[in-house]
Image: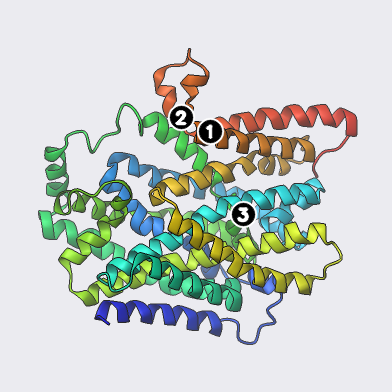
Amino acid sequence: MNIALIIISAFLLLAVFLGIRSTKGKDMDLEQWTVGGRGFSGIFVFLLMAGEIYTTFSFLGGSGWAYGKGAPALYVLMYIGLSYVVSYWLLPVIWRYAKEHKLVSQSDFFVSKFNSPYLGVLVALVGVIGMLPVIVVQLKGLGIIVSQASYGAISMQTAVWIGAISLTIYVMLSGVHGSAWTAAIKDIVMVVVICFLGIYLPLHYYGGFQPMFEAVHAANPDFLKFPDEGYSMTWVISTVLLLVLGFYMWPQVFSSTYTAKNEKVFRKNAIISPLYTLMLLFVFFVGTAAILTVPGLEGEDVDLSLLRLSIETFDPWVIGIIGGAGLLTALVPGSLLIMNTATLLAKNIYQVFAPNTSDKTIGKLARLFVPVVSLLAVYFTLHGGATLSNIILMGYSLMTQLAPSLFCSLWKRNFINKYGAAAGIIAGLAVVAYITTSQTTLVDLIPSLPQSWNDVNTGIIALVVNCVVMIVVSLATRRKHGLAGK
């Protein structure tokens, strides 16, 4: 066993230890397991939300996009920064309502607002379908990190299985408490590693940031600007809009919101977090530094750029620390995603059809769903393709379909009812599925549109259809049933 693998294993054991230790003296019922008894301080809420955002995509996918796409990678900085602005007003409202009604999942919010358990089932299904690809991203990223950092001693497939088994045990034992404590270690290590790599590698290979960009520009003058087609400014603007609207639609974000002790936490985080986002610039610097030093990576292999360059540059013990940091970026968000998927399956789907099931039984069932979710994620990880960034974007297209009905539910005079909300969500999902499978573009549907409209993100098209259907169905059924959300 090489030194890199020993260090990575030590990080994994530390995370599991912290997860088990974090539950000491706590009665791990469903509320403690999922939302930490609603008693987390500002620092833990900040770390949990950062843990969901700065994942293996930030570690590998961000550098992969800088390596493979160039300027369009900046969309990541744009949407995360703007999303924090939204959180300043949105999250305190969600937190107050959730605390008043003792909610533990995102689906609970829709059930309570629209007085419809079956709408909750639909929302839970969307959450499960949307989160599975993102769990795949974490396992795939973890597999890449362990396989590469171990210098091939552990295969990608073996690493995925080890990661899935570790995540399963970790989540079943510790729930959100373990994620919060591990997030503290993860963020410290990740910030140090990414900032070091983002500064050292450009200096080492090019003599500075300016010479690096000059060398890349000389090799490919178009690489550092937005293309006229494909990942154009039309794509960037529509994608940023989609991702800002969908940023807080993820079930694990809802449950992290519920953990806060008070609503002031969110406003403080909204002020501090955009500065924290600047760390992603260093990820882009690493990907850019790799363009000329490890050329020839294509397709899914662009996600290897950070690790390939690091392996060529550093001794094995340094690679072990980099691999350990990467492992934690998979473990924290992966645990939150699996926990929330299992909770939705147990509480918001199973319990609706078995209403006499006690909360204690639902808590046990949620834990039993954890290995089921993990096995599904392993299957799709080992049998799926696409880069990490494309998988994440697909998940956003799905999850953002919940945004129109959720935002409308916050109005004092909400005229959207459960029928409109459900119809809009289903219509949006159907459009995403149709356009994705048929490869149809907006100009194919409406030939009179300018060619640049081909680059509009699929999720935005679905969102427009969603809103139209939601409003029309709500107005039509409102007259008939006289029902609307709270």
Mark carried by residue 456: 2
Q: Quadrant of residue 145?
A: bottom left
| Residue 11, visible in the rendered structure | yes
Q: Quadrant of residue 371?
A: bottom right
In this image, 195 relative to 135: left or right? left
The x and y percentages for residue 368 are 66, 71
Q: Nearer the viewer, residue 339 or 275?
A: 339
Is residue 95 positioned above or below 441 on the image? below
Q: Residues within 10 Å of mark 1 (few under 14, many from 20)?
A: many
Q: Nearer the viewer, residue 8 or 269?
A: 8
The x and y percentages for residue 162 are 44, 73
Residue drawn at x 69%, y 40% is 405
- Give the CA distance from mark 2 to mark 3: 26 Å
Q: Quadrant of the C terminus?
A: top right
Residue drawn at x 17%, y 56% is 202
Q: Secondary structure at mark 1?
A: helix
Q: Badge 3 is on which residue?
A: 128
Between disc 2 and disc 3, the foreground one is 3
Which colour scheme appears in the figure?
rainbow
The x and y percentages for residue 282 are 28, 56
Q: Amino acid at mark 2?
A: Val
Q: Secondary structure at mark 2?
A: loop
- Give the CA distance from mark 1 to mark 2: 7 Å
Is residue 423 positioned above or below 371 on the image? above
| Residue 81, visible in the rendered structure | no
Q: Amino acid at mark 3?
A: Val
In this image, 229 relative to 205: left or right? right
Q: Badge 1 is on which residue?
A: 460
